Amino acid sequence: MDANDALRRYLEQRRELGESELVLDSLSVEEAMKLLGAATGGSKKSAKAPTSTDWRAAVRAAGGAPEARPSLGTSVPPEVLEEVPTLAPRAAAVPATAVHVPSTQTPSAPMVALKDVPTGLIVSGASRALADDIAAKLASIEEIAATVAKCTRCPLYATAKNPVPGTGNPNADFMIVGEAPGANEDEQGVPFVGQAGQLLTKIIGAINLTRDDVFIVNVLKHRPPGNRNPLPEEVQACSPYLVRQIELIRPKVILALGTFAAQTLLETKNTIGKLRGQIHRYYGVPLIVTYHPAALLRNPAWKRPTWEDVQLARRILDQ
Ligand code: URA
């Protein structure tokens, strides 16, 4: 595959992700045109066809700097998510009082002082709207699990083998929200135990936490047949459990994994490319969006942004 093919495949992936715009950091329009083989405004001369198999090398050959995207300043490569499940000393990696919020849409986004991000739960109108739901009266994480085990609010209980209410430390400061159980999770009744789950365990380890330190849940507590996408009515039926879990656990930070969890929690249709790199709030709790580990297995290039996202979440946890 030559550089043009590699670039085309990359752009196709971004488009499949729902991104409609792409910022090529540090690359002028002229340089981008040159890279794509178009005549330049100045000389009308076509650029030499790139010969490298790496599109980034082709961009660099055209005078761009494709890896110059603003980052949180870590010197640790995302490959660490595969190999070394520990983080380099944070003091060296991230400034103490502020983090830069990277975004493909706003490369010059302002610095956000983490001390300004509220912690704990702010009960909003939406939360009170759930007060009549039976889930709002459940007094503990165990009670939620017991209620989920008997739940018939949507038809998924009939096809699932086991309920998957959530796992981890009920006093966790760090909560992770995925989409829905898959086949392995359905077998075991525990979230994120398959291949994606193993990668998630490494991601958690990469910020010096273990699965016992965090609480892991899904938006849906029963597996959709054949891993199909959750339906809106299933999400609506199951959401009170998630809200109550968050109310009881009162995490300092929530990490939403993947488009579905992020769009559901934030009630938005924005793409993950737009949602990641910012501090959102869910019922007042800071919420960071990152790629789903299953997506990382398909596309290892997303490990670097994921690395930055989880570091940001870790920084919030530490404040
Ligand atoms: N994917 C999810 O979103 N959740 C799981 O528990 C497993 C895979």
Image: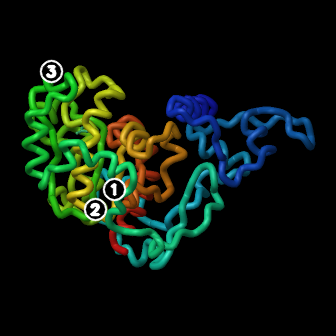
Per the model, the C-alpha gap separating discs 1 and 3 is 29 Å
Q: Earlier in the sequence, mark 1 or mark 3?
A: 3
**Residue that appears at 30% across and 38% down:** 179
Q: Amino acid at mark 1?
A: Ile
Q: Amino acid at mark 3?
A: Thr
**Which of the two residues, 48 or 99, is positioned nearer the viewer here?**
99
Per the image, the residue denoted by label 1 is 254
In this view of the protein, can residue 85 be seen by the observer? Answer: no
**Which of the two residues, 16 or 255, is positioned nearer the viewer here?**
255
Q: Name the quarter where the N terminus is drawn.
A: top right
Residue 186 in the image: state x and y as whole percent: 14, 32
In this view of the protein, can residue 242 be seen by the observer? Answer: yes
Q: Are marks 2 and 1 in contact (CB under 8 Å)?
A: yes
Residue 251: numbered disc: 2
Per the image, the residue denoted by label 3 is 159
Q: Is residue 154 left or right of residue 262?
A: left
How many numbered markers are drawn? Answer: 3
Q: Is mark 3 within 8 Å of ligand 1?
A: no
